[in-house]
Image: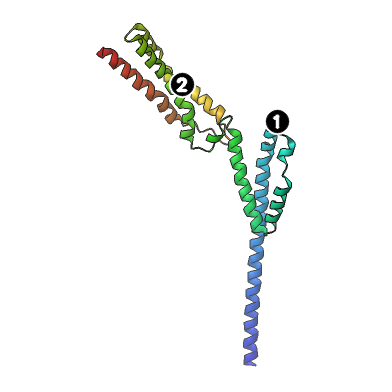
Amino acid sequence: MAVAWADYLAATRQLDGVRRDAATAASEQARTVQAAREELAAVRTRLAPQEAQLREAGVPPMSLVPAPPELTEATRTMTGGSGAVLAALREANRWAHGADDVLAARGLPGAAHWPARPRNLLVYGPLALLVPLLQIVAYLVAGSDAVTVLTLVVGLPAPAVAFGVGWLAVGRLFPSRPGERVDRTFRFGALTCLVPAVLTTAGIVLAMLAA
């Protein structure tokens, strides 16, 4: 009887372990399914405005529908269980997130993923160099003439004007996604517009004094 009781306790413990493992697996499965549903909702939320924007841009509706090979590949991925489905949905969400950046960058899709400073430098930089270049050309042509002095005086508010134009252009070229603000890198943009003007003005004044 002692041996039979020991066998019974061992079987009971084994059955309890199996029951616990099954409960843990079921709970993990339920969490994975819930996460997949939430990920699917997020992907659909991202894709809906993208589809509308592409249709407004004149993209044919047939191009917005998955092709048969794509459907076959997606079906093959779905057969791997809820974990594979969740991984595929997360990957789709990352692709949709990148598509948001590309669609938001009007005319500059390659710079959409860049950090804010290098991206904004594409806007602030040319604007900051425009007036200093004109001042240098005026000095090379007119020397220490009144034309050069006039360009220096006119160029005094140029950094502020360049920064204001750049501020607006960054918002137009790199609009933010819904619920986010455009990162215009205020201090970086101001320095980018100010430094070339100061250096150019100082160099021209020193050259005029030396002449």
Callout 1, which amino acid?
Gly
Residue at the disc numbered 1: 58
Helix, strand or loop at mark 1 = loop
Left or right of 136 on screen, residue 123 = right
Mark 2 vs mark 1, CA separation in Å: 35 Å
Identify the residue at horizontal 62%, vertical 74% (top origin).
Answer: 17
Does residue 98 sit above or below 135 in this rendering? Answer: below
Split into 4 quadrants, where in the image is the N terminus?
Answer: bottom right
Q: Which residue is outermost to the left?
A: 210
In which quadrant of the rendered view does residue 76 lie?
bottom right
Q: Which colour scheme is used?
A: rainbow
Q: Which residue is outermost to the top?
A: 146
* Front-lying residue, 177 or 97: 97
Residue at the disc numbered 2: 162
Q: Where is residue 209 in the image (x, y as percent from the top left)?
A: 26, 13
Left or right of 84 on screen, residue 157 = left
**10 Å crowding of disc 1: few (<14), some (14-19), many (20+):** few
Q: Where is residue 54 in the image (x, y as percent from the top left)?
A: 68, 34
Q: Position of residue 142 (x, y in %)?
A: 35, 9
The label nearer to you, 2 versus 1, is 1
* Front-lying residue, 154 or 76: 76
**10 Å crowding of disc 2: few (<14), some (14-19), many (20+):** many
